[in-house]
Image: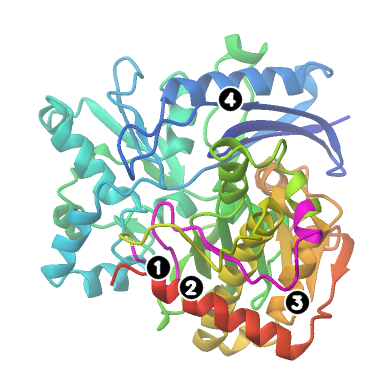
Amino acid sequence: MTYLLALDQGTTSTRSILFRQDVSVAAVAQQEFPQHYPEPGWVEHDPEDLWRSAVATLREALAGVSVDEIAALGIANQRETTILWSRKTGQAIAPAIVWQDRRTAERCAALRAQGLEPMIAKKTGLLLDPYFSGTKIAWLLDHVEGARARATAGELAFGTVDSFLIWRLTGGAVHATDATNAARTLLFDIHRGAWDEALCAAFDVPVSLLPEVRDSAGDFGTTTPDLFGRALPIRGVAGDQQAATVGQACFAPGMLKSTYGTGCFALLNTGDQPVASKNRLLTTIAYQLNGRRTYALEGAIFVAGASVQWLRDELGLLTAAAEAGELAAAADPAQDVYLVPAFVGLGAPHWDAGARGAIFGLTRGTTRKELARAALESVGYQTRELIEAMRADWPGAAQTVLRVDGGMTASDWTMQFLADILEAPVDRPKIMETTALGAAYLAGLAAGVLPAPETFARSWALDRRFTPNLAAAARERKWRGWRDAVARTRSR
Protein backbone atom coordinates (compact mmCIF):
# COMPACT_ATOMS: atom_id res chain seq x y z
CA MET A 1 0.00 0.00 0.00
CA THR A 2 1.25 3.48 -0.90
CA TYR A 3 0.16 6.43 1.20
CA LEU A 4 0.40 10.19 0.85
CA LEU A 5 0.69 12.42 3.90
CA ALA A 6 -0.73 15.95 3.97
CA LEU A 7 -0.04 18.68 6.50
CA ASP A 8 -2.77 21.34 6.55
CA GLN A 9 -1.48 24.13 8.78
CA GLY A 10 -4.43 26.49 9.24
CA THR A 11 -5.21 29.64 11.17
CA THR A 12 -6.75 28.08 14.25
CA SER A 13 -5.63 24.45 14.04
CA THR A 14 -3.12 22.13 12.41
CA ARG A 15 -4.32 18.93 10.77
CA SER A 16 -2.46 16.03 9.27
CA ILE A 17 -4.29 13.60 7.02
CA LEU A 18 -3.08 10.30 5.64
CA PHE A 19 -4.49 9.44 2.23
CA ARG A 20 -4.44 6.08 0.51
CA GLN A 21 -3.35 6.06 -3.13
CA ASP A 22 -7.02 6.10 -4.18
CA VAL A 23 -7.23 9.38 -2.16
CA SER A 24 -9.56 7.91 0.45
CA VAL A 25 -8.78 9.08 3.99
CA ALA A 26 -6.89 6.60 6.17
CA ALA A 27 -6.21 8.75 9.25
CA VAL A 28 -6.79 12.27 10.57
CA ALA A 29 -5.10 14.11 13.43
CA GLN A 30 -5.84 17.66 14.53
CA GLN A 31 -4.69 20.11 17.19
CA GLU A 32 -5.96 23.60 17.91
CA PHE A 33 -3.46 26.20 19.10
CA PRO A 34 -3.79 29.58 20.86
CA GLN A 35 -4.61 32.84 19.13
CA HIS A 36 -2.97 35.98 20.52
CA TYR A 37 -4.47 39.48 20.30
CA PRO A 38 -1.91 41.78 22.00
CA GLU A 39 -3.59 44.97 20.76
CA PRO A 40 -6.84 45.83 18.94
CA GLY A 41 -6.51 44.72 15.31
CA TRP A 42 -3.38 42.65 16.01
CA VAL A 43 -3.36 38.86 15.57
CA GLU A 44 -0.32 36.73 16.36
CA HIS A 45 0.74 33.09 16.59
CA ASP A 46 3.66 31.59 18.44
CA PRO A 47 5.71 29.90 15.68
CA GLU A 48 6.62 27.15 18.13
CA ASP A 49 2.91 26.31 18.45
CA LEU A 50 2.77 25.88 14.67
CA TRP A 51 5.85 23.67 14.70
CA ARG A 52 4.83 21.53 17.67
CA SER A 53 1.31 20.95 16.36
CA ALA A 54 2.67 20.08 12.90
CA VAL A 55 5.06 17.44 14.21
CA ALA A 56 2.55 16.04 16.71
CA THR A 57 -0.27 15.65 14.19
CA LEU A 58 2.03 14.18 11.53
CA ARG A 59 3.24 11.57 14.02
CA GLU A 60 -0.31 10.79 15.10
CA ALA A 61 -1.50 10.38 11.51
CA LEU A 62 1.41 8.04 10.80
CA ALA A 63 0.82 5.90 13.87
CA GLY A 64 -1.12 3.14 12.11
CA VAL A 65 1.16 2.54 9.12
CA SER A 66 4.78 1.85 8.35
CA VAL A 67 6.68 5.01 7.51
CA ASP A 68 8.21 3.07 4.60
CA GLU A 69 4.81 3.11 2.89
CA ILE A 70 4.71 6.93 2.63
CA ALA A 71 5.39 8.07 -0.92
CA ALA A 72 5.54 11.80 -0.15
CA LEU A 73 4.45 14.64 2.12
CA GLY A 74 2.50 17.66 0.92
CA ILE A 75 2.02 20.94 2.79
CA ALA A 76 -0.87 23.42 2.67
CA ASN A 77 -0.62 26.48 4.85
CA GLN A 78 -2.34 29.60 6.05
CA ARG A 79 -1.11 32.22 3.62
CA GLU A 80 0.43 35.69 4.20
CA THR A 81 1.23 34.94 7.85
CA THR A 82 4.76 36.25 8.31
CA ILE A 83 7.69 34.76 10.21
CA LEU A 84 11.32 35.90 10.48
CA TRP A 85 13.83 33.47 11.94
CA SER A 86 17.54 33.02 12.54
CA ARG A 87 19.32 31.06 9.84
CA LYS A 88 21.72 29.78 12.49
CA THR A 89 19.27 28.54 15.12
CA GLY A 90 15.96 28.25 13.25
CA GLN A 91 14.30 30.23 16.05
CA ALA A 92 11.78 32.94 15.18
CA ILE A 93 12.80 36.42 16.30
CA ALA A 94 9.22 37.46 17.12
CA PRO A 95 5.67 36.11 17.06
CA ALA A 96 4.23 35.35 13.65
CA ILE A 97 2.07 38.19 12.32
CA VAL A 98 -1.10 36.50 11.11
CA TRP A 99 -2.78 37.31 7.81
CA GLN A 100 -5.74 38.85 9.70
CA ASP A 101 -3.50 41.39 11.45
CA ARG A 102 -4.15 45.08 10.63
CA ARG A 103 -1.20 46.80 12.32
CA THR A 104 0.33 47.96 9.04
CA ALA A 105 -2.74 49.82 7.77
CA GLU A 106 -1.00 53.19 8.11
CA ARG A 107 2.02 51.95 6.18
CA CYS A 108 -0.25 50.77 3.39
CA ALA A 109 -1.98 54.15 3.34
CA ALA A 110 1.40 55.92 3.12
CA LEU A 111 2.48 53.80 0.15
CA ARG A 112 -0.86 54.47 -1.49
CA ALA A 113 -0.39 58.19 -0.95
CA GLN A 114 2.98 57.93 -2.71
CA GLY A 115 1.14 56.69 -5.79
CA LEU A 116 2.68 53.21 -5.68
CA GLU A 117 -0.47 51.10 -5.71
CA PRO A 118 -0.90 50.98 -9.53
CA MET A 119 2.67 49.69 -9.99
CA ILE A 120 2.28 47.19 -7.17
CA ALA A 121 -1.07 45.94 -8.47
CA LYS A 122 0.23 45.59 -12.03
CA LYS A 123 3.14 43.39 -10.95
CA THR A 124 1.59 41.42 -8.10
CA GLY A 125 -2.13 41.34 -8.90
CA LEU A 126 -2.73 42.46 -5.31
CA LEU A 127 -3.91 45.63 -3.60
CA LEU A 128 -2.17 47.56 -0.86
CA ASP A 129 -3.61 46.05 2.28
CA PRO A 130 -2.22 44.87 5.64
CA TYR A 131 -3.47 41.39 4.70
CA PHE A 132 -0.34 40.65 2.66
CA SER A 133 3.17 39.88 3.86
CA GLY A 134 5.25 42.78 2.51
CA THR A 135 4.39 45.40 5.11
CA LYS A 136 4.44 42.76 7.86
CA ILE A 137 8.08 41.93 7.05
CA ALA A 138 9.05 45.59 7.16
CA TRP A 139 7.21 46.05 10.47
CA LEU A 140 9.19 43.22 12.08
CA LEU A 141 12.47 44.56 10.73
CA ASP A 142 11.71 48.00 12.15
CA HIS A 143 10.23 46.98 15.52
CA VAL A 144 12.31 44.00 16.64
CA GLU A 145 15.58 45.26 18.10
CA GLY A 146 18.52 44.63 15.78
CA ALA A 147 16.40 42.85 13.17
CA ARG A 148 17.16 45.10 10.23
CA ALA A 149 20.91 44.97 10.86
CA ARG A 150 20.75 41.18 11.18
CA ALA A 151 18.75 40.95 7.96
CA THR A 152 21.26 43.12 6.11
CA ALA A 153 24.04 40.87 7.40
CA GLY A 154 22.25 37.81 5.97
CA GLU A 155 21.52 36.29 9.39
CA LEU A 156 17.72 36.14 9.03
CA ALA A 157 15.26 34.33 6.79
CA PHE A 158 11.68 35.24 5.92
CA GLY A 159 8.94 32.84 5.13
CA THR A 160 5.26 32.31 5.11
CA VAL A 161 4.32 29.32 7.26
CA ASP A 162 5.19 26.78 4.55
CA SER A 163 8.77 28.04 4.34
CA PHE A 164 9.20 28.02 8.11
CA LEU A 165 7.94 24.46 8.38
CA ILE A 166 10.06 23.29 5.42
CA TRP A 167 13.13 24.83 7.06
CA ARG A 168 12.40 23.06 10.33
CA LEU A 169 11.39 19.74 8.74
CA THR A 170 14.57 19.62 6.64
CA GLY A 171 16.82 20.72 9.49
CA GLY A 172 17.59 24.03 7.78
CA ALA A 173 18.65 22.40 4.51
CA VAL A 174 15.90 24.02 2.39
CA HIS A 175 14.71 27.63 2.35
CA ALA A 176 11.97 27.55 -0.27
CA THR A 177 8.36 28.32 -1.01
CA ASP A 178 6.06 27.67 -3.94
CA ALA A 179 4.69 30.15 -6.45
CA THR A 180 1.24 30.36 -4.84
CA ASN A 181 2.65 31.48 -1.51
CA ALA A 182 5.20 33.81 -3.09
CA ALA A 183 2.33 35.46 -4.96
CA ARG A 184 0.80 36.60 -1.65
CA THR A 185 3.73 38.66 -0.40
CA LEU A 186 3.46 41.87 -2.50
CA LEU A 187 7.09 41.21 -3.49
CA PHE A 188 6.59 38.71 -6.34
CA ASP A 189 5.98 39.55 -9.99
CA ILE A 190 3.33 37.01 -10.97
CA HIS A 191 3.91 37.64 -14.69
CA ARG A 192 7.66 36.97 -14.64
CA GLY A 193 7.43 34.42 -11.83
CA ALA A 194 10.24 36.05 -9.84
CA TRP A 195 10.96 38.24 -6.84
CA ASP A 196 11.01 41.88 -7.90
CA GLU A 197 13.76 44.21 -6.71
CA ALA A 198 11.67 47.34 -7.23
CA LEU A 199 8.89 45.91 -5.08
CA CYS A 200 11.38 44.91 -2.39
CA ALA A 201 12.78 48.42 -2.43
CA ALA A 202 9.30 49.95 -2.13
CA PHE A 203 8.57 47.85 0.96
CA ASP A 204 12.15 48.19 2.31
CA VAL A 205 12.64 44.42 2.41
CA PRO A 206 16.11 42.98 1.65
CA VAL A 207 16.00 40.44 -1.18
CA SER A 208 18.42 38.27 0.81
CA LEU A 209 15.60 37.39 3.24
CA LEU A 210 13.48 35.69 0.61
CA PRO A 211 13.13 31.94 -0.08
CA GLU A 212 13.68 30.21 -3.41
CA VAL A 213 10.43 29.90 -5.38
CA ARG A 214 9.58 26.45 -6.77
CA ASP A 215 6.72 24.66 -8.54
CA SER A 216 3.75 23.65 -6.40
CA ALA A 217 4.54 20.02 -7.23
CA GLY A 218 8.28 19.59 -6.88
CA ASP A 219 11.25 18.80 -4.70
CA PHE A 220 11.28 20.59 -1.33
CA GLY A 221 13.86 18.33 0.28
CA THR A 222 13.35 15.59 2.84
CA THR A 223 12.50 15.59 6.52
CA THR A 224 15.27 14.76 8.94
CA PRO A 225 15.17 11.02 9.80
CA ASP A 226 14.80 11.62 13.54
CA LEU A 227 11.35 13.23 13.16
CA PHE A 228 9.37 10.31 11.74
CA GLY A 229 11.68 7.32 11.62
CA ARG A 230 12.99 7.92 8.13
CA ALA A 231 13.46 10.83 5.76
CA LEU A 232 10.15 11.66 4.07
CA PRO A 233 10.25 13.46 0.71
CA ILE A 234 8.39 16.79 0.68
CA ARG A 235 6.98 17.01 -2.85
CA GLY A 236 3.98 19.35 -2.77
CA VAL A 237 3.41 22.85 -1.36
CA ALA A 238 0.61 25.36 -1.87
CA GLY A 239 -1.19 28.06 0.04
CA ASP A 240 -4.30 26.60 1.60
CA GLN A 241 -6.77 28.25 -0.77
CA GLN A 242 -4.83 27.20 -3.83
CA ALA A 243 -4.48 23.70 -2.39
CA ALA A 244 -8.26 23.58 -2.01
CA THR A 245 -8.62 24.70 -5.64
CA VAL A 246 -6.48 21.72 -6.64
CA GLY A 247 -8.33 19.39 -4.27
CA GLN A 248 -11.62 20.51 -5.81
CA ALA A 249 -10.15 19.64 -9.24
CA CYS A 250 -10.78 23.17 -10.55
CA PHE A 251 -8.29 22.69 -13.37
CA ALA A 252 -10.36 24.15 -16.23
CA PRO A 253 -10.85 27.89 -16.85
CA GLY A 254 -14.20 29.02 -15.47
CA MET A 255 -14.24 26.57 -12.55
CA LEU A 256 -14.86 28.17 -9.17
CA LYS A 257 -14.39 27.01 -5.59
CA SER A 258 -15.05 28.71 -2.27
CA THR A 259 -13.59 27.56 1.04
CA TYR A 260 -15.40 28.33 4.29
CA GLY A 261 -13.07 28.18 7.25
CA THR A 262 -11.92 30.97 9.54
CA GLY A 263 -12.38 33.24 6.53
CA CYS A 264 -13.85 32.59 3.11
CA PHE A 265 -11.85 32.54 -0.10
CA ALA A 266 -13.30 32.13 -3.58
CA LEU A 267 -10.94 31.32 -6.47
CA LEU A 268 -11.94 31.33 -10.13
CA ASN A 269 -9.59 29.58 -12.57
CA THR A 270 -8.82 31.92 -15.49
CA GLY A 271 -6.28 29.68 -17.24
CA ASP A 272 -2.85 30.74 -18.41
CA GLN A 273 -3.79 34.42 -18.65
CA PRO A 274 -3.99 36.66 -15.58
CA VAL A 275 -7.17 38.77 -15.51
CA ALA A 276 -6.74 42.26 -14.08
CA SER A 277 -9.74 42.99 -11.88
CA LYS A 278 -11.69 46.20 -12.25
CA ASN A 279 -13.73 45.38 -9.16
CA ARG A 280 -11.04 45.16 -6.49
CA LEU A 281 -10.57 41.43 -6.62
CA LEU A 282 -7.11 39.87 -6.57
CA THR A 283 -5.24 38.35 -9.47
CA THR A 284 -3.20 35.46 -8.18
CA ILE A 285 -1.50 32.19 -9.09
CA ALA A 286 -3.76 29.14 -8.70
CA TYR A 287 -0.87 26.66 -9.06
CA GLN A 288 2.39 26.24 -10.92
CA LEU A 289 3.28 22.91 -12.56
CA ASN A 290 6.35 22.22 -14.69
CA GLY A 291 7.20 25.92 -14.66
CA ARG A 292 3.80 26.91 -16.10
CA ARG A 293 1.55 29.16 -14.07
CA THR A 294 -2.24 28.90 -13.98
CA TYR A 295 -3.94 32.07 -12.76
CA ALA A 296 -7.08 32.85 -10.79
CA LEU A 297 -9.28 35.70 -9.71
CA GLU A 298 -9.69 35.63 -5.95
CA GLY A 299 -12.04 37.22 -3.49
CA ALA A 300 -10.99 37.18 0.16
CA ILE A 301 -13.45 37.42 3.06
CA PHE A 302 -11.64 37.82 6.36
CA VAL A 303 -14.36 36.46 8.66
CA ALA A 304 -16.62 33.49 7.92
CA GLY A 305 -16.46 30.65 10.44
CA ALA A 306 -14.73 33.05 12.81
CA SER A 307 -18.07 34.81 13.35
CA VAL A 308 -19.55 31.55 14.66
CA GLN A 309 -16.49 31.08 16.87
CA TRP A 310 -17.11 34.61 18.20
CA LEU A 311 -20.68 33.75 19.10
CA ARG A 312 -19.43 30.62 20.86
CA ASP A 313 -16.24 31.77 22.57
CA GLU A 314 -16.66 35.48 23.25
CA LEU A 315 -20.43 35.82 23.67
CA GLY A 316 -21.18 32.33 24.99
CA LEU A 317 -24.32 32.03 22.82
CA LEU A 318 -23.38 28.60 21.45
CA THR A 319 -22.06 25.49 23.13
CA ALA A 320 -20.65 24.19 19.83
CA ALA A 321 -20.21 25.70 16.38
CA ALA A 322 -22.48 23.04 14.86
CA GLU A 323 -25.38 24.43 16.93
CA ALA A 324 -25.52 27.56 14.77
CA GLY A 325 -27.34 25.87 11.90
CA GLU A 326 -30.02 24.44 14.20
CA LEU A 327 -30.61 27.83 15.79
CA ALA A 328 -30.70 29.58 12.40
CA ALA A 329 -33.36 27.17 11.16
CA ALA A 330 -35.52 28.03 14.19
CA ALA A 331 -35.06 31.82 13.93
CA ASP A 332 -37.99 34.19 13.43
CA PRO A 333 -38.27 34.82 9.64
CA ALA A 334 -39.96 38.17 10.30
CA GLN A 335 -36.79 39.58 11.88
CA ASP A 336 -34.17 40.83 9.42
CA VAL A 337 -31.02 40.93 11.52
CA TYR A 338 -27.68 41.58 9.81
CA LEU A 339 -24.23 40.90 11.21
CA VAL A 340 -21.43 42.58 9.28
CA PRO A 341 -18.40 40.69 10.65
CA ALA A 342 -15.78 43.37 10.03
CA PHE A 343 -13.83 42.40 13.14
CA VAL A 344 -10.53 42.94 11.30
CA GLY A 345 -11.85 45.19 8.55
CA LEU A 346 -13.61 44.28 5.32
CA GLY A 347 -11.90 42.27 2.59
CA ALA A 348 -12.86 42.08 -1.07
CA PRO A 349 -14.34 43.92 -2.78
CA HIS A 350 -14.31 46.73 -0.16
CA TRP A 351 -10.75 46.54 1.26
CA ASP A 352 -11.65 48.75 4.18
CA ALA A 353 -9.11 48.16 6.95
CA GLY A 354 -10.81 50.69 9.22
CA ALA A 355 -14.28 49.10 9.19
CA ARG A 356 -15.38 47.30 12.34
CA GLY A 357 -18.13 44.78 13.01
CA ALA A 358 -21.72 45.81 13.55
CA ILE A 359 -25.17 44.29 14.03
CA PHE A 360 -28.28 45.89 12.51
CA GLY A 361 -31.99 45.21 12.93
CA LEU A 362 -31.99 44.28 16.61
CA THR A 363 -35.35 44.35 18.38
CA ARG A 364 -36.44 43.46 21.88
CA GLY A 365 -37.50 40.11 20.48
CA THR A 366 -34.10 39.28 18.99
CA THR A 367 -32.63 36.09 20.44
CA ARG A 368 -29.52 34.01 19.91
CA LYS A 369 -31.42 32.24 17.13
CA GLU A 370 -31.55 35.39 15.01
CA LEU A 371 -27.91 36.21 15.82
CA ALA A 372 -26.82 32.72 14.74
CA ARG A 373 -28.78 33.09 11.52
CA ALA A 374 -27.24 36.52 10.89
CA ALA A 375 -23.73 35.09 11.33
CA LEU A 376 -24.37 32.28 8.86
CA GLU A 377 -26.19 34.51 6.38
CA SER A 378 -23.26 36.97 6.38
CA VAL A 379 -21.18 34.29 4.69
CA GLY A 380 -23.68 34.00 1.85
CA TYR A 381 -23.97 37.74 1.39
CA GLN A 382 -20.21 38.20 1.29
CA THR A 383 -19.85 35.36 -1.21
CA ARG A 384 -22.42 37.00 -3.48
CA GLU A 385 -20.39 40.22 -3.40
CA LEU A 386 -17.36 38.26 -4.61
CA ILE A 387 -19.13 36.35 -7.35
CA GLU A 388 -20.86 39.44 -8.71
CA ALA A 389 -17.44 41.09 -8.96
CA MET A 390 -15.99 38.02 -10.72
CA ARG A 391 -18.80 37.97 -13.26
CA ALA A 392 -18.23 41.65 -13.96
CA ASP A 393 -14.49 41.08 -14.41
CA TRP A 394 -14.53 37.97 -16.58
CA PRO A 395 -17.31 36.66 -18.85
CA GLY A 396 -16.17 33.07 -18.21
CA ALA A 397 -17.70 33.26 -14.74
CA ALA A 398 -21.24 33.91 -15.95
CA GLN A 399 -22.71 30.42 -15.47
CA THR A 400 -20.29 29.02 -12.93
CA VAL A 401 -21.33 26.33 -10.46
CA LEU A 402 -19.78 26.93 -7.05
CA ARG A 403 -17.82 24.05 -5.50
CA VAL A 404 -17.57 24.46 -1.74
CA ASP A 405 -15.41 23.06 1.04
CA GLY A 406 -14.31 23.87 4.57
CA GLY A 407 -15.85 23.29 7.97
CA MET A 408 -18.95 25.45 7.45
CA THR A 409 -20.10 23.38 4.47
CA ALA A 410 -21.17 20.60 6.84
CA SER A 411 -24.17 22.81 7.66
CA ASP A 412 -26.94 22.04 5.18
CA TRP A 413 -28.80 25.17 6.30
CA THR A 414 -25.83 27.41 5.48
CA MET A 415 -25.25 25.81 2.07
CA GLN A 416 -28.93 26.11 1.17
CA PHE A 417 -28.91 29.80 2.06
CA LEU A 418 -25.77 30.21 -0.03
CA ALA A 419 -27.51 28.71 -3.06
CA ASP A 420 -30.59 30.84 -2.38
CA ILE A 421 -28.79 34.17 -2.13
CA LEU A 422 -26.50 33.40 -5.09
CA GLU A 423 -29.36 32.06 -7.19
CA ALA A 424 -26.89 29.43 -8.36
CA PRO A 425 -26.10 25.75 -7.71
CA VAL A 426 -23.71 24.92 -4.86
CA ASP A 427 -21.87 21.59 -5.05
CA ARG A 428 -20.48 19.90 -1.94
CA PRO A 429 -17.99 17.08 -2.62
CA LYS A 430 -17.86 13.68 -0.95
CA ILE A 431 -14.28 14.31 0.15
CA MET A 432 -14.53 17.37 2.37
CA GLU A 433 -10.81 17.54 3.18
CA THR A 434 -10.09 19.32 -0.07
CA THR A 435 -7.24 21.51 1.20
CA ALA A 436 -5.30 18.53 2.50
CA LEU A 437 -6.28 16.53 -0.58
CA GLY A 438 -4.82 19.24 -2.82
CA ALA A 439 -1.53 19.14 -0.93
CA ALA A 440 -1.49 15.35 -1.10
CA TYR A 441 -2.27 15.41 -4.82
CA LEU A 442 0.57 17.83 -5.57
CA ALA A 443 2.96 15.62 -3.59
CA GLY A 444 1.68 12.48 -5.29
CA LEU A 445 1.95 14.07 -8.73
CA ALA A 446 5.58 15.02 -8.13
CA ALA A 447 6.30 11.59 -6.64
CA GLY A 448 4.84 9.88 -9.69
CA VAL A 449 2.11 7.96 -7.83
CA LEU A 450 -0.91 10.07 -8.89
CA PRO A 451 -2.05 10.90 -12.43
CA ALA A 452 -2.08 14.12 -14.44
CA PRO A 453 -4.66 16.78 -13.50
CA GLU A 454 -7.16 15.84 -16.23
CA THR A 455 -7.28 12.24 -15.00
CA PHE A 456 -7.32 13.19 -11.33
CA ALA A 457 -10.28 15.52 -11.99
CA ARG A 458 -12.43 12.50 -12.88
CA SER A 459 -12.11 11.25 -9.30
CA TRP A 460 -14.00 14.27 -7.93
CA ALA A 461 -17.36 13.05 -6.59
CA LEU A 462 -20.49 14.98 -5.62
CA ASP A 463 -22.04 14.55 -2.19
CA ARG A 464 -24.93 16.95 -2.65
CA ARG A 465 -26.01 19.79 -4.91
CA PHE A 466 -27.95 22.63 -3.28
CA THR A 467 -30.26 24.47 -5.68
CA PRO A 468 -31.93 27.83 -5.03
CA ASN A 469 -35.56 27.82 -3.86
CA LEU A 470 -35.94 31.26 -2.27
CA ALA A 471 -38.48 33.55 -3.93
CA ALA A 472 -36.90 36.33 -5.98
CA ALA A 473 -38.63 39.09 -4.01
CA ALA A 474 -37.36 37.72 -0.68
CA ARG A 475 -33.85 37.29 -2.10
CA GLU A 476 -33.61 40.86 -3.28
CA ARG A 477 -35.16 42.26 -0.09
CA LYS A 478 -32.56 40.48 2.01
CA TRP A 479 -29.79 41.56 -0.38
CA ARG A 480 -30.82 45.22 -0.18
CA GLY A 481 -30.76 44.98 3.61
CA TRP A 482 -27.24 43.57 3.53
CA ARG A 483 -25.94 46.27 1.23
CA ASP A 484 -27.44 48.94 3.48
CA ALA A 485 -25.80 47.34 6.54
CA VAL A 486 -22.39 47.26 4.85
CA ALA A 487 -22.72 50.88 3.77
CA ARG A 488 -23.38 51.85 7.40
CA THR A 489 -20.34 49.87 8.56
CA ARG A 490 -17.78 51.32 6.16
CA SER A 491 -15.14 53.62 7.61
CA ARG A 492 -15.10 55.83 4.55
Q: Position of residue 250 (x, y in %)?
A: 69, 66
The circle drawn on residue 485 is 2
- Mark 4: which amino acid? Ala
User: Of the residues under marks 3 and 1, which one precedes in the sequence?
Assistant: 3
Q: Position of residue 201 (x, y in %)?
A: 14, 54
- Mark 1: which amino acid? Thr
Q: Badge 4 is on which residue?
A: 54
Q: Evaluate if marks 2 and 1 touch, with contact meaning CB atoms under 8 Å apart.
A: yes
Question: From mark 2 to mark 3, how far is it between C-alphas?
Answer: 19 Å
Question: From mark 1 to mark 4, how far is it between C-alphas?
Answer: 38 Å
Q: Position of residue 133 (x, y in %)?
A: 33, 48
User: Of the residues under marks 2 and 4, which one precedes in the sequence?
Assistant: 4
Position of residue 277 relative to residue 317, above or below, is below
Q: Position of residue 332 (x, y in %)?
A: 75, 65
- Mark 2: which amino acid? Ala
Q: Badge 3 is on which residue?
A: 420
User: Of the residues under marks 1 and 4, which one precedes in the sequence?
Assistant: 4
- Mark 3: which amino acid? Asp
Say how the picture is coloured: rainbow
Q: Evaluate if marks 3 and 4 touch, with contact meaning CB atoms under 8 Å apart.
A: no
Position of residue 165 relative to residue 101, above or below, is above
Magenta stretch: dominant secondary structure: loop
Any part of residue 218 in sight: no
Q: Badge 4, how many Cα within 10 Å: few under 14, some, many 20+? A: many
Position of residue 147 relative to residue 117, above or below, is above
Q: Badge 1, how many Cα within 10 Å: few under 14, some, many 20+? A: many
Q: Report the span colored magenta.
A: 327-352
Nearest-to-viewer mark from 1 and 4: 1
Residue at 46% across / 53% down in the picture? 179
